[in-house]
Image (cartoon, rainbow, N blue to C red):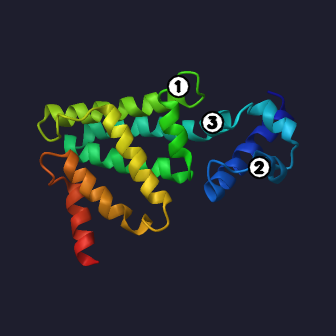
């Protein structure tokens, strides 16, 4: 990539990250291009679709979640690893308002630019869930698809202004429902913080 093209690409990504964080996944691509100081045609040369732009924004975060799952798998108890990863995953999905709908659609659409990233993220969570199930600390009647759906539901709650204040409380309830022994450190800490409210 030429130096000027790389500069435009980097500028578009930086601006897109800020705009999508502020306005959500449906933010105007025209506005992103304008704020980046380039024409709409330049944006489309680098990112032919909205999904391609969002996939680029999300790929780094999803890759970090996969790496995080590997770290948690070797350094935490199965239940703590699962709950910690779930919390990180919800925070990632919530970072860009409105992206949950795209994630849920992309997981079923192999042609989606977001498909591979979402499948990789779901596989990381599935691995942590299976480890907790094998240790007898997580319910065995849920699978990775259910866990991915719960990530979407919890991130959606955070996107709702009237429910956002209750999101941590609801996360604690759902986490303790997933676990057969809901005394993991993350859930215990959540309970302590709620009791101080």
User: As displayed, is residue 19 above or below residue 165?
Assistant: above
For residue 127, side relative to residue 41 (left or right): left
Labels 3, 2: front one: 2
- Residue 56, numbered circle: 3
Image coordinates for residue 174, horizontal then vertical, percent: 27, 52
Percent from the top left, x then y, of residue 123? 37, 29
Q: Are marks 3 and 2 in contact (CB under 8 Å)?
A: no
Residue at image point 60% right, 28% down: 113
Give the residue displayed 39% in from the left and 33% down from the top.
122
Kind of element beneath mark 1: loop
Give residue 32's mark.
Answer: 2
- Is residue 1 at all visible to an observer of this figure? yes
Relative horizontal placement of residue 14, taking residue 103 as reference (left or right): right
Q: Quadrant of residue 111?
A: top right
Picture coordinates of residue 106, whole percent (x, y): 52, 31
**In this view, the mark in front (3 or 1):** 1
Q: Which residue is mark 1?
A: 109
Q: Earlier in the sequence, mark 3 or mark 1?
A: 3
Q: Give the alpha-carbon distance from disc 3 to disc 2, as whole Å.
A: 15 Å
The quarter of the image holding the C terminus is bottom left
Q: Dividing the picture into quarters, in which one does residue 164 lie?
A: bottom left
Q: How many dots with numbers?
A: 3
Q: Which mark is residue 73?
A: none
Pointer 2 local density, CA inside 10 Å: few below 14, some 14–19, many at least 20: many
For residue 54, side relative to residue 188 (left or right)? right
The answer to whether residue 77 is visible is no
Camera-near label (1 vs 2) is 1
Q: Secondary structure at mark 3?
A: helix
Q: Quadrant of the N terminus?
A: top right
Q: Are marks 1 and 2 in contact (CB under 8 Å)?
A: no
């Amino acid at each position: 990539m030429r130096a000027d093209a790389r500069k435009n690409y980097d500028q578009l990504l930086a601006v897109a990250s800020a705009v999508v964080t502020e306005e959500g996944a449906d933010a105007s691509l025209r506005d992103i291009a304008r704020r980046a100081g380039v024409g709409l045609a330049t944006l489309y040369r680098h990112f032919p679709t909205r999904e391609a732009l969002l996939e680029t924004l999300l790929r780094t975060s999803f890759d970090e979640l996969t790496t995080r799952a590997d770290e948690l798998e070797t350094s935490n108890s199965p239940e703590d690893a699962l709950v910690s990863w779930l919390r990180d995953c919800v925070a990632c999905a919530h970072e860009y308002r409105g992206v949950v709908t795209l994630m849920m659609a992309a997981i079923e659409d192999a042609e989606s630019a977001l498909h591979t990233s979402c499948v990789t993220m779901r596989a990381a969570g599935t691995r942590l869930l299976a480890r907790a199930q094998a240790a007898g600390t997580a319910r065995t009647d849920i699978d990775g698809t259910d866990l991915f759906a719960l990530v979407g539901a919890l991130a959606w709650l955070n996107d709702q202004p009237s429910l956002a204040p209750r999101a941590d409380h609801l996360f604690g309830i759902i986490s303790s429902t997933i676990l057969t022994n809901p005394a993991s450190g993350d859930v215990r800490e959540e309970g302590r913080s709620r009791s101080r409210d």
